[in-house]
Image (cartoon, grey):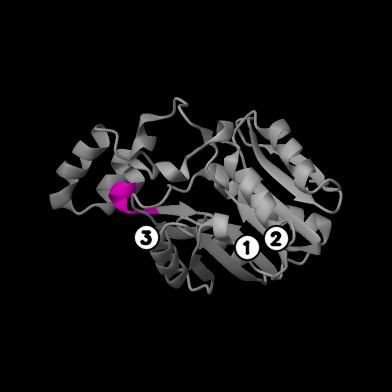
Amino acid sequence: MSDLELIKKFVAPDEQEEAIKKLNAGYPVQYIIGNVDFYGSIINVDNNVLIPRFETEFLVDKTIKCLKSLNIRALNVLEIGTGSGCIAISLKKNLDCEIDAIDINKNAIKIASENARNNQVDINFQVLDIHYFQTDKKYDLIISNPPYVPLGSKVDVKIKYEPQDAIYAAQNGLYFYNIILGKIKNNLNNDYLIAFEIGDKQGELIKKIVHYYLPFAHIKVERDLNNYERYVFISNKQILI
């Protein structure tokens, strides 16, 4: 369905002219209609959260398949940088697990909590900066789609309407992988899976970061439907997906 068709379907007739003006100015249609269909769930969005994309649907799908192939029962899950809550909600619907989901943005946590209620799932959301993450809890699965676009990169003009701190990262886009792995390396169960969405061409660089914090881990870089490097999976077991 085209963006114009979405507006005609979801926007009230007396508001469609203004909505089309926004669309023609480059404003994302997802923000105009207020929601996205993500992995079978309706996820409400506004400009406090990153728009869920199909690449992230594949992160969820590949993570579920990877857990199955590794025979890891993900009872305790941590999502870092939950945004709209789309990843946590999708995992909760498909895994028998408890999920802690954190984000630095209190408005994002509010939206994520509303999305969880709308989708009838129970998730432990918390406003928390990953820099201050500290717990003795052990996790079977840690998943994140952190900011990974290098500062100064040229991107789609529509991205300017999305929260910039959810998109760009220092250290050539690698900053948060360093922070996350440094913070969670002692919070992994004996059998574990870490799943990241990444930028294309970041795979080998992230492997080096992983080996620094988890020198004995198995690592696999996976590509998206456009054949770009897009995911990294890390485990104590050999990854066969």
What secondary structure is marked by label 1? strand
Q: CA distance from mark 2 to mark 3?
A: 25 Å
Contact between labelled residues 3 and 1, with CB atoms less than 8 Å apart = no
Left or right: residue 31 compared with residue 222: left
Q: Kindly identify the residue that appears in the image at 77 percent across and 42 percent down.
A: 212
Query: Between 202 and 22, which is closer to the camera in this rendering?
Result: 202
| Kind of residue indicated by mark 1 | Leu
Contact between labelled residues 2 and 1, with CB atoms less than 8 Å apart = yes
Residue 62 seen anywhere in this rendered image of the structure: no
Left or right: residue 145 compared with residue 84: right
Is 113 a magenta residue?
no
Is 34 a magenta residue?
yes
Boundaries of the magenta span: 31-35
Circle 2 packing at 10 Å, graded few (<14), some (14-19), many (20+), is many
Q: Kindly identify the residue that appears in the image at 54 percent across and 72 percent down.
A: 124
Q: Which residue is mark 2?
A: 141
Task: Give the image location of residue 122, x and y in percent.
Answer: 53, 74
Q: Quadrant of residue 101?
A: bottom right
Task: Give the image location of residue 21, x and y in percent.
Answer: 19, 37
Q: Which residue is mark 3?
A: 107
Image height check: is 84 above or below 211?
below
Q: Kindly identify the residue that appears in the image at 26 percent across and 37 percent down.
A: 23
Image height check: is 206 above or below 91?
above
Left or right: residue 227 compared with residue 110: right
Label of residue 78 in the image: 1
What secondary structure is marked by label 2? strand
- Label whose residue precedes the other's in the sequence (1 or 2): 1
Residue occupying the far left of the picture: 14
Label of residue 130 in the image: none
